[in-house]
Amino acid sequence: MAHILLFYIYISCIGLTYPNAATLALSPFSKNRGSAAALLGCLQMGIGSLASAGFGLLKFETGVSLAIMFSLAAGLGFFNFIYLERMRPLKTV
């Protein structure tokens, strides 16, 4: 039962954050917004297929496999965020 509750909370957080993240990601593109949205969708499908294949290759109990994949995805996202923040040029006021 705890797995279901944690899964529900995780999916709810994704439902709240993804539309805002997609809006922020597409905001710099004014002329080629359709192409940028298509690239974002392609990346999502590619990452989702890799995560699905990784989940299928894990030979643990289902709950443990889910926890591993969720933790891995969250960790990769965090390190990606940190890396991109370091690459962003500083704004001068």
Image (spheres, rainbow, N blue to C red):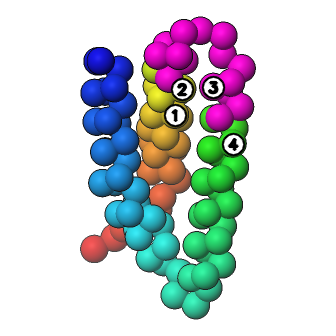
Residue 79 visible somewhere in the drawing? no
Q: Residues within 10 Å of mark 2 (few under 14, many from 20)?
A: some
Lower position in the chain sequence, tag 3 or tag 2: 3
The residue beneath circle 2 is 69
Say which residue appears at 63% left-offset and 25% top-offset.
55
Lower position in the chain sequence, tag 3 or tag 4: 4
Residue 10 visible somewhere in the drawing? yes
Say which residue appears at 52% left-offset and 34% top-offset.
73
Location of residue 22 (image quadrant): bottom left
Depth-wise, is mark 1 or mark 2 nearer the camera? Answer: 2
Q: Is 54 inside the magenta-drawn segment? A: yes
User: Residue 33 placed where, x, y %?
Assistant: 56, 82
Contact (CB < 8 A) between labels 1 and 4? no
Contact (CB < 8 A) between labels 1 and 2? yes
The residue beneath circle 4 is 49
User: Residue 57 placed where, x, y %?
Assistant: 71, 20
Contact (CB < 8 A) between labels 2 and 4? no
Contact (CB < 8 A) between labels 3 and 2? yes
Looking at the rendered structure, which numbered label has been put on residue 73? 1
- Could you say whether the residue bearing mark 4 is in a helix, strand or loop? helix
The residue beneath circle 3 is 55
- Could you say whether the residue bearing mark 1 is in a helix, strand or loop? helix
Give the CA separation, mark 1 to mark 3: 11 Å
